Image (tube, rainbow, N blue to C red):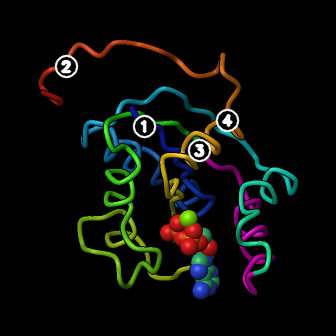
Amino acid sequence: MERTLILVKPDGVQRGLMGEIVGRFERRGLKLIGMKFIQMDESLANRHYAVHKERPFFNDLVSYITSGPVLAMVWEGNEAVAAARSTIGATKPVEAAPGSIRGDFGMEIGRNLVHGSDSPENGVKESNLFFKPEELVSWSRATESWICE
Ligand code: DAT
Ligand code: MG
């Protein structure tokens, strides 16, 4: 079972798209196991985006993600990482498929609405960066057998 950290970034929050975005993961069949509404500080943003530290856009990335509150979530499922990334769409919203979150709501790479982990390993690492073990909920979903064989 994989986990993926999903963030509704500050533009998604400010534009009133939290419900829309949560609904898409929920309808897809992913299972929510953690959720919190937080203001990221610079230290958390630096750790979250550590792999991009040497990129020219790093400072903009940190300012953007700390510019307002984010909705942080952990979603679980078989191949949760790939499923979430296809629901999110390509990094550049103009190249993202219609029907994906970025393809339906985004125009620019610097305002691409959502973060999703890029590998199962990072799904676990990033979930642990944002959530303590006791903040994640283990629960059985009544509809499970209608979503997974
Ligand atoms: P993703 O968010 O699709 O996983 P990523 O991990 O490659 O994309 O990059 C993280 C974020 O950094 C991305 O959501 C937007 C920003 N970014 C990536 N490439 C960029 C670029 N060439 N110019 C400006 N911002 C960029
Ligand atoms: Mg990424």
Instruction: Identify the residue at horizontal 66%, vertical 21% (top origin).
Output: 133
47 vs 34, left or right, is right
Residues at marks 1 and 4 touching, judged by CB atoms closer than 8 Å = no
* Residue toward you, 126 or 120: 120
Q: Which structural element holds mark 3?
A: strand
Residue 126 image position (x, y, % from top left): 64, 45
Residue at the spot of label 2: 143
Residues at marks 1 and 3 touching, judged by CB atoms closer than 8 Å = no
Label 2 – label 4 distance at C-alpha = 27 Å
| Sequence order check, earlier mark of 2 and 4 | 4
Label 1 – label 3 distance at C-alpha = 20 Å
Q: Which structural element holds mark 2?
A: loop
| Sequence order check, earlier mark of 1 and 2 | 1
Q: Which structural element holds mark 4?
A: helix
Q: Label 2: few (<14), some or many (≥20) within 10 Å?
A: few
| Sequence order check, earlier mark of 1 and 4 | 1
Residue at the spot of label 4: 128
Residue at the spot of label 1: 2
* Magenta-highlighted residues: 55-71
Of the 4 image quadrants, the one containing the N terminus is top left
Q: Can you tell me which quadrant of the image ligand 2 is in?
A: bottom right
Q: Which structural element holds mark 1?
A: strand
Does the magenta run of residues contain 63?
A: yes
Instruction: Identify the residue at horizontal 24%, vertical 73% (top origin).
Output: 98
Residue 36 image position (x, y, % from top left): 62, 33
Q: Which mark is residue 71?
A: 3
Q: Label 1: few (<14), some or many (≥20) within 10 Å?
A: some
58 vs 135, left or right, is right
Label 3 – label 4 distance at C-alpha = 15 Å
Amino acid type indicated by mark 2:
Thr
